[in-house]
Amino acid sequence: MRALFFSFKLIDSNSLMFILRNIFNTLVVISLFSVFTSASAVDKSTVKEKWHTPYDLYLSPKEAYDMKLADPENVLMIDVRTRAEVQFVGFTDMADANIPIFLLTEEWKLKRDEIHGEFRKTYNNDFVLAVDNFIASRNKDKSVPIILMCQSGGRSPFAASDLHEAGYKTVYFQVEGFEGLKVKEGPNKGKRVLNGWKNAGLPWNYSLKTDKMYFNFAPEKQQ
């Protein structure tokens, strides 16, 4: 210890600060590398084939939360659900933006039983442009890590494919989405109470922050 102390005394203060700063930066890089590599712990074989993405980077809700929490400024999370969903179902402040991959329409779509139905969704052809606008607003480029979240896992793969074609480098898919999966039997049959962000007890609420909403990033025709 005396020898180490003596050697530091021989170094001028500027050089010492340079050395310490480099050590700190190295430790930060090692820490972030550890977070990113451990974050993609969901095995591809456990993910539905129709949900596979060109990146093959899959996160559980807790892994997505931990990854975002570890570096909130340099890991961006995008909720790709419709605007109606984030308003009436809930939203997490961990997400940086709501940019829908599909837009809700007023057209009614009957299901196979010809009794029940739902309002049809249409593909958002301006999704990538809106993401580009969002990324630029954060002074980032296409190398920034992005986490995608949808309702239950069906839409994020479409968003990931679009971003892959557009040249984005690292896009994670948070499997089972914000609401989770529907159970197939029991008293909660048909309800989304299985897995997902909300069911994992992760933070969410019904309060929407203005600067995270789609109209900030959408082309003018959609604002």
Image (tube, rainbow, N blue to C red):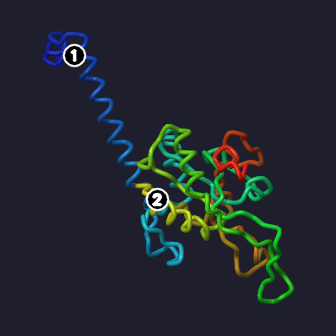
Residue furthest right in the image:
115
Left or right of 115? Residue 16 is left
User: Element at badge 2?
Assistant: loop
Q: Residue at x 48, y 58 (%)?
A: 172
**Nearer the observer, 8 or 218:** 218
User: Element at badge 1?
Assistant: helix
Question: Mark 2, residues whose alpha carbon is within 10 Å: few (<14), some, or many (≥20)?
Answer: few
Q: Residue 184: x percent and y percent? A: 70, 81
Whichever of callouts 2 and 1 sits on the residue coming sooner in the sequence is 1
Q: Residue at x 17, y 12 (%)?
A: 11
**Camera-side mark, 2 or 1:** 2
**Residue 76, placed above or below residue 185:** above
Instruction: Give the label on residue 15, or none.
Output: 1
Instruction: Give the label on residue 199, or none.
Output: none
Q: Residue 213: x percent and y percent? A: 69, 46
**Quarter of the image holding residue 26?**
top left
**Quarter of the image holding residue 40?**
bottom left
Residue furthest bottom in the image:
113
**Residue 153, placed above or below residue 78:** below
Question: Mark 1, residues whose alpha carbon is within 10 Å: few (<14), some, or many (≥20)?
Answer: few
Q: Residue at x 13, y 17 (%)?
A: 3
Q: Residue 89: x percent and y percent? A: 77, 57
**Nearer the observer, 148 or 220:** 220
| Circle 2: residue type | Ala
**What residue would you read off at disc 2?**
166
Q: Residue at x 74, y 48 (%)?
A: 205
Left or right of 59? Residue 22 is left
Q: Residue 68: x percent and y percent? A: 52, 46
- Disc 2/disc 1 C-alpha distance (Å): 43 Å
| Circle 1: residue type | Ser
Quadrant for the N terminus in the image: top left
